[in-house]
Amino acid sequence: MIKTVDLYKSFGETEVLTEINTEFERGKTNLIIGASGSGKTTLTKCIVGLIKPTKGKVLYEGKDFHAMDFQEKKEIRKKIGFLFQGGALFDSQTVEENLQFPLDMFTNQTAKEKLDRVNFCLDRVNLKGVNKLYPAELSGGMKKRVGIARAIAMKPQYLFCDEPNSGLDPKTSILIDNLIKEITHEYDITTIVITHDMNSVLEIGENVMFIHEGRKLWEGSRREILETNNREVVEFVYASSFMQTIREKANLK
Amino acid sequence: MKLLSHIGRFTLLMLITFKRPESWKSFRKRIVTEMNDLGLDSLPIIAVISVFMGAVVTIQTSTNIDSGFIPLYTVGFAARQSVILEFSPTIIALILVGKVGSSISSEIGTMRVTEQIDALEIMGINSANFLIFPKIIAAVLINPFLITLSMAIGIAGGYAVAVGTGLIGASDYEYGIQLDFKMYDYYYAMIKTVVFAFVLTSIPAYFGYYTSGGSVEVGKSSTTAVVVSSIVILILNYLLTQLLLI
Ligand SMILES: Nc1ncnc2c1ncn2[C@@H]1O[C@H](COP(=O)(O)OP(=O)(O)O)[C@@H](O)[C@H]1O
Ligand SMILES: [Mg+2]
């Protein structure tokens, strides 16, 4: 479980995150939703320590990450898998080398053990025969899958996914979303997914947190989000005519 | 003010770069790869430039000696001195800024804007140490070799043109290039080479590492890196010369 306590972040004069108090449960897909520029990426980067918050705490199982020493932080980071918005695969390495990279750096496994793990992870995200390809040779959906495979290579306890289905077609999006949810349940890990896609929210949003201009305005489940009266959430949820139609149909009943 | 903040940030980056590597095995592997990418791949261009520079220096000196008081072997002497003292260590360093420096800056800059550096950090890897350290070490190790080779090729280029065109005789040139040779001059050149190797890897790495934005910014930081590295090399060349030769 990850918890944030009174988290603030400013870049220079502009405050990007204001008083964020929230909890991300283990074994659940915890969604952070909100419009572009609302601070979702900044929040996750504060949580994993890529950005230092101006104020506040980030607790991993009760321990304050930003108060830890270098070695303790490193131990936590080894338990974090992160799927970046653009995949962030290492261009100069093949898919296999990308997945093997953390194993090379942090384990003493034999070549065979590493290769087995690589193939297991690729298999888990339903990829075959891509071991020797370079990231530039992969489609958007394949990159995300490889990104997920790399994120789970070290058997993380915490999985972060920054807009896992941005730039993907709706069908691939749903596959990726479900993959993330399955992995979360299967390995009983704490998963945090950033999205601004309502489909994802309805598909996998076990816990949903809505942020608007750097503040947490609402949290609840995917069922509750359809019924809330919070003005900003309603505007976000029913921005598309598709969702509006759903609401109208529901109101008719 | 801006200059001071750059110097401060550069120093901090170097402090986190020069740390014990996470894995020695991968560190050694990266040094070898970088020596190949930064060093051996530059050999052809270095050879071509060196041979022509040696030839041009030789022609220019010999056409300027028309008084009978100056012995012909001066041509060989002048070619050797200018190649060893200035042309190989400094001009080749400037060429390498354009070739190696710009590629370091755009490689690291691209890794920054595509979040590959964040990906390293998330895994608990010191990205500056992992990416920059092997490049600096590789250049510091391989450049003395490249520059020494450039010296030899430059002097040989002069020889070829001197003898080939009959400007001066082979024996005059040979005598000239051996005349009054001081090993200290070579050491001076090697000190410059090592310092410039550090400059032309670390400064572009710095500009790449702190790129933010997209591909346009990657291009811009690469240009800035080349300009700044070149100026720093020219200034240090002046300072080192004053310090070591006077
Ligand atoms: N490194 C940075 N420096 C300055 N401003 C930043 C930086 N990173 C993000 N911001 C600003 O913070 C706000 C939130 O950005 P971000 O967290 O990326 O939003 P989201 O991921 O929700 O789209 C934006 O206004 C953005 O311009
Ligand atoms: Mg974002």
Image (spheres, coloured by chain):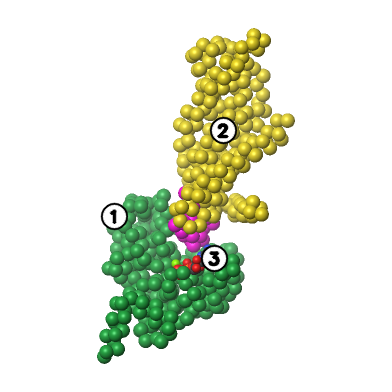
Would you say the beta carbon of the disc 1 residue lies within 8 angstroms of ligand 2?
Answer: no
Name the residue: 36% across, 62% down: A144
Q: Which residue is mark 3?
A: A51
Q: Residue furthest right?
A: B246
Q: Position of residue A45 (x, y in %)?
A: 50, 67
Q: Residue furthest top?
A: B68
Query: Do residues under tags 1 and 3 come within 8 Å of each other at their CB atoms?
Result: no
On screen, residue B173 above or below A236: above
Residue stretch in magenta: B107-127
The amino acid type found where label 2 is placed reads: Ile
Tell me the mark number nearer the camera, choosing from 1 and 2. 2
The amino acid type found where label 3 is placed reads: Ile
Name the residue: 41% across, 81% down: A233
Residue B216 among those drawn in magenta? no
Chain bearing mark 3:
A
Tell me the mark number nearer the camera, choosing from 3 and 2. 2
Ligand 2 image position (quadrant)? bottom left
Q: Which residue is mark 2?
A: B91
Question: What is the C-alpha distance between the residues marked 1 and 2?
Answer: 48 Å
Helix or strand or loop: what does disc 1 sit on? Answer: loop
Helix or strand or loop: what does disc 3 sit on? Answer: loop
Q: Position of residue A225 (x, y in %)?
A: 38, 83
Q: Is residue A78 left or right of residue A237?
A: right
Would you say the beta carbon of the disc 2 residue lies within 8 angstroms of ligand 1?
Answer: no
